[in-house]
Image: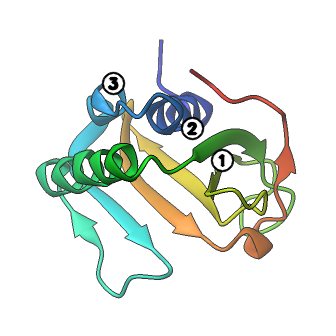
Amino acid sequence: MELTEKDAAIAYAKAWNTLNCSEYLQLLVGDCCYESQWVFSALEGKEAISEYFIGKLQTVKETRSTVRAELAVAAAGPHPDRNCVLLTQGTDEKVQVVVVFTVTDGKISRYDLCAPEMFMPQVTGVYPI
């Protein structure tokens, strides 16, 4: 079965909701790119992304922060109807970021953190674990 953007979104949301990213990281292609609108330089390569993501989840665990990752579907932006993930951290219910994925040859080749306003995501109420 071919990995889809929805599969990538489910794996990413599950990583955040369980604070365990090992399954998600296995889906990344070796030269994957991770980019955020709030950071000036991209993370390039599975090794760099893995180190960052593992550290990020460890910090969340240590600080006992609350993170929620919900599946959604973009209603606007360059690719309407695109599967994505909404991330919310802390006690505020406001969605802070939308995460979109690019899948190439059955692996995640790129994922981006974007402002929710760009995609006008439609919530699903699904929080994979």
| Display colour scheme | rainbow
Tell me the residue that label 2 is attached to: 9
Q: Earlier in the sequence, mark 3 or mark 2?
A: 2
The residue lying at 50 percent from left, 80 percent from top is 37
Labelled pair 2, 1 in contact (Cβ < 8 Å): yes
Dot 1 lies on which element?
Answer: strand
Please tell me which residue is depicted at 63% across the width and 43% down the height of the picture.
68
Front residue of 43/108: it is: 43
Q: Is residue 65 left or right of residue 42?
A: right
Q: Earlier in the sequence, mark 3 or mark 1?
A: 3
Q: Amino acid at mark 3?
A: Glu
Residue carrying label 1: 84
Amino acid type of the residue tagged 2 in the rendering: Ala
Residue at (81%, 56%) from the top-left corner?
Answer: 121
Residue 83's image quarter?
Answer: top right
Residue that mark 3 sits on: 23
Residue 102: give x, y in percent of width and height. 48, 50
Q: CA distance from mark 3 to mark 2?
A: 12 Å
Badge 1: how crowded within 10 Å, few (<14), some, or many (20+)?
A: many
